[in-house]
Image (cartoon, rainbow, N blue to C red):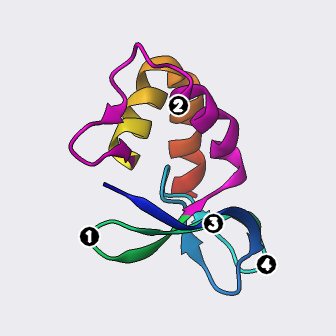
Amino acid sequence: MITILTPPHRVKARKPHRCDWCGKLIETGEEHTASTNVGDGIYTWRECDRCSSFVGEMIGMPDKFYYDDIAGGWTAEGFIDFMREEHPKTWKAWEEADRK
């Protein structure tokens, strides 16, 4: 079960990070959404702007199996499955862009 310590809020990266949904590099100075959570330990979850609307869409699909009952929430693996199944062209474009 995941407990939210600090709800999602906008921040500007002070150093490079990776988006926890898609793995995109979040550059220093780039604005993104972050939250602090407790699961197996305390951690910060970071979401890049390109994932935002897709995450909302995924969470709004209760009849799909992207929610991880064992983890008690949505996971990066579930998001990747969602993108590959629901938005394959977008996911492929992201993979190609991230290789550069």
Q: Label 2 vs label 1: CA separation?
A: 22 Å
Which residue, given by chain and number where applicable, does mark 4 sit on? Answer: 29
Q: Quadrant of residue 62?
A: top left
Q: Which residue is mark 1?
A: 40
Q: Which residue is mark 3?
A: 34
Which residue carries the number 2 mark?
A: 59
Give the extent of the magenta segment. Answer: 46-75
Left or right: where does residue 33 sit relative to residue 44? Answer: right
Q: What is the three-letter code of the residue carrying label 4? A: Gly
Dividing the image into 4 quarters, which one contains the C terminus?
bottom right
**Closer to the N terminus: mark 2 or mark 1?**
1
**Residue 14 placed where, x, y %?**
70, 86
Mark 4, residues whose alpha carbon is within 10 Å: few (<14), some, or many (≥20)?
A: few
Q: Residue at x 64, y 68 (%)?
A: 26
Q: Position of residue 83 (x, y in %)?
A: 48, 30
- Looking at the image, is mark 3 or mark 2 earlier in the sequence? 3
Q: Is residue 71 shown in magenta?
A: yes
> Label 1 neighbourhood size at 10 Å, few (<14), some (14-19), many (20+)?
few
Could you tell whether 98 is left or right of 3 in the image?
right
Spot occupied by residue 17 in the image (x, y as percentages of width and height): 56, 74
